[in-house]
Image (tube, rainbow, N blue to C red):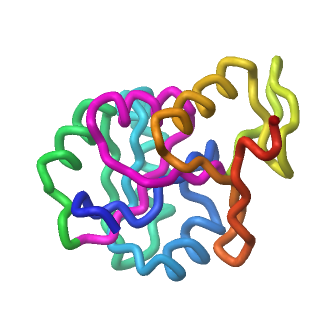
Amino acid sequence: MDNNGIVNFRLDERLIHGQVATFWTRTLGVTRIMIVDNDILSDEISKKALQAAVPSGIRLSVLSVASAARKLNNGTYTGQRVFLIVRRTNTIRELLEAGVKVKEVNIGNMGVKNGRKQIFKSVYCTKEELKDIQDIEKSGVLVYAQMVPNDDKKKFTSFIN
């Protein structure tokens, strides 16, 4: 865990769902789930759904990229166990560009959509998303695919090279 509190940084388009709410949070000993997504901030229904999905005893933060980066970089969550979840590859890139320090990023679920091709089990990417992921790796951050905690971590670029 870095001094910013992050114990896992995951891209999962479903955000908080069964695996996240139970399996991941217990395995990681999470005290806070942080959703970073600029669009959700203006969507009251989505925010309420996220609040309802958070397991009892775990705090929830729903933040913009700028706010999350500022709080993480200032050490607001030092001593906590933060599970950081985003929906898009460009959000990962923006957080890193804003100075958020992480050693690795878990690509967990990216669904079937127009322009995407299958990379791994439940991971489909456009060319732009693949470029984001490759740029993230070039910056020195390990990007891996892992659906659930007991799966092996598989280096993401091993699926695309």
Position of 125 with respect to 51 (left or right) is right
Q: Which image quarter: residue 157?
A: top right
Relative to 5, does residue 66 appear above or below in the rendering? Answer: above
The location of residue 11, given as percent across then percent down, is 57, 46
The location of residue 98, given as percent across then percent down, is 28, 31
- The number of numbered badges drawn on the structure is 0
Q: Residue at x 30, y 42 (%)?
A: 100
Q: Residue at x 75, y 30 (%)?
A: 125
Q: Residue at x 44, y 27 (%)?
A: 39
The location of residue 147, given as percent across then percent down, is 71, 61
Position of 27 with respect to 114 (left or right) is left
Q: Residue at x 61, y 33 (%)?
A: 133
Relative to 56, does residue 51 appear above or below in the rendering? Answer: above
Relative to 109, does residue 66 appear above or below in the rendering? Answer: above
In the picture, the quarter occupied by the C terminus is top right
Residue in front for this viewpoint, 93 or 108 = 93
The location of residue 45, given as percent across then percent down, is 47, 40
Position of 24 with respect to 121 (left or right) is left
Relative to 3, does residue 112 appear above or below in the rendering? Answer: above
Q: Which image quarter: residue 117?
A: top right
Q: Is 99 covered by the magenta stretch?
A: yes
Residue in front for this viewpoint, 61 or 110 = 110
Start and end of the magenta stretch? 80-107
In the picture, the quarter occupied by the N terminus is bottom left
Q: Is 97 covered by the magenta stretch?
A: yes
Residue in front for this viewpoint, 59 or 108 = 108
